[in-house]
Image (cartoon, grey):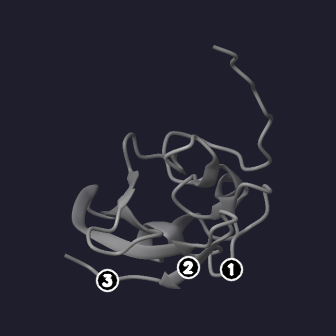
């Protein structure tokens, strides 16, 4: 088995997740604040996928570039019953009370060439 490494432009602090096709082709990855595609560019709508107060806390600060500082703060999973769709599930964290308030979910779609785009930004559950 051959293992390859590619340097990615998006910086990470703690929160990170990625999603690949069944063939192992990278579709997208996130640091909790931004979502980049396989070409290392922001996907359409991936600039603020799950905007929340925690995001606002980092916005405009140097730390913004490194994403959320939450261990296991995001996960990508297949959207059940929807081919070529991914759920981006993230923790909504309240920086003032130091507590998790909810989970939020954005929906990302991708085409046969694995080009990703955000379909829906946020919904809490």
What percent of the width, then of the height, locates residue 65? 71, 55
Q: What's the residue at 52%, 75% (across, down)? A: 109
Q: Earlier in the sequence, mark 1 or mark 3?
A: 1
Q: On the rendered image, what quadrant is the C terminus found in?
A: bottom left
Judged left or right of residue 97, residue 29 is right
Residue 6, quarter of picture: top right
Residue 40, quarter of picture: bottom right
Of 50 and 23, nearer the camera is 23
Q: Mark 3 points at which residue?
A: 123
Q: What's the residue at 26%, 62% (across, down)? A: 97
**Distance in Å between CA atoms under marks 1 and 2:** 6 Å
Above or below, 34 relative to 70: below
Q: Name the residue under label 1.
A: 44
Mark 2 burial class by Cα count in 10 Å: few <14, some 14-19, many 20+: many
- Label 3: element kind: loop
Q: What's the residue at 24%, 59% (across, down)? A: 100
Q: Which of marks 1 and 2 is nearer the N terminus?
A: 1
- Label 1: element kind: loop
Q: Which of marks 3 and 2 is in front?
A: 2
Q: Name the residue under label 2.
A: 118
Judged left or right of residue 37, residue 72 is left
Q: Which of marks 3 and 2 is nearer the N terminus?
A: 2
Q: Nearer the viewer, mark 1 or mark 3?
A: 1
Of 64 and 115, nearer the camera is 115
Residue 50 visible from this viewpoint: no
Whether the residues at callouts 1 and 2 have beta carbons within 8 Å, the answer is yes
What percent of the width, then of the height, locates residue 98? 28, 55
Mark 1 burial class by Cα count in 10 Å: few <14, some 14-19, many 20+: some
Above or below, 84 relative to 76: below
């Amino acid at each position: 088995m051959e293992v390859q490494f590619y340097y990615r432009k998006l910086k990470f602090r703690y929160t990170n997740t990625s999603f690949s096709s069944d063939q192992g082709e990278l579709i997208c990855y996130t640091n909790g604040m931004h979502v980049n595609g396989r070409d290392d560019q922001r996907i359409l709508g991936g600039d603020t996928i799950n905007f929340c107060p925690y995001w606002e806390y980092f916005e405009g600060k140097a730390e913004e570039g490194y994403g959320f500082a939450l261990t296991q703060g995001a996960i990508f999973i297949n959207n059940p019953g929807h081919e070529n769709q991914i759920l981006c599930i993230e923790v909504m964290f309240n920086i003032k009370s130091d507590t998790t308030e909810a989970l939020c979910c954005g929906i990302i779609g991708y085409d046969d060439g694995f080009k990703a785009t955000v379909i829906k930004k946020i919904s809490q559950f």
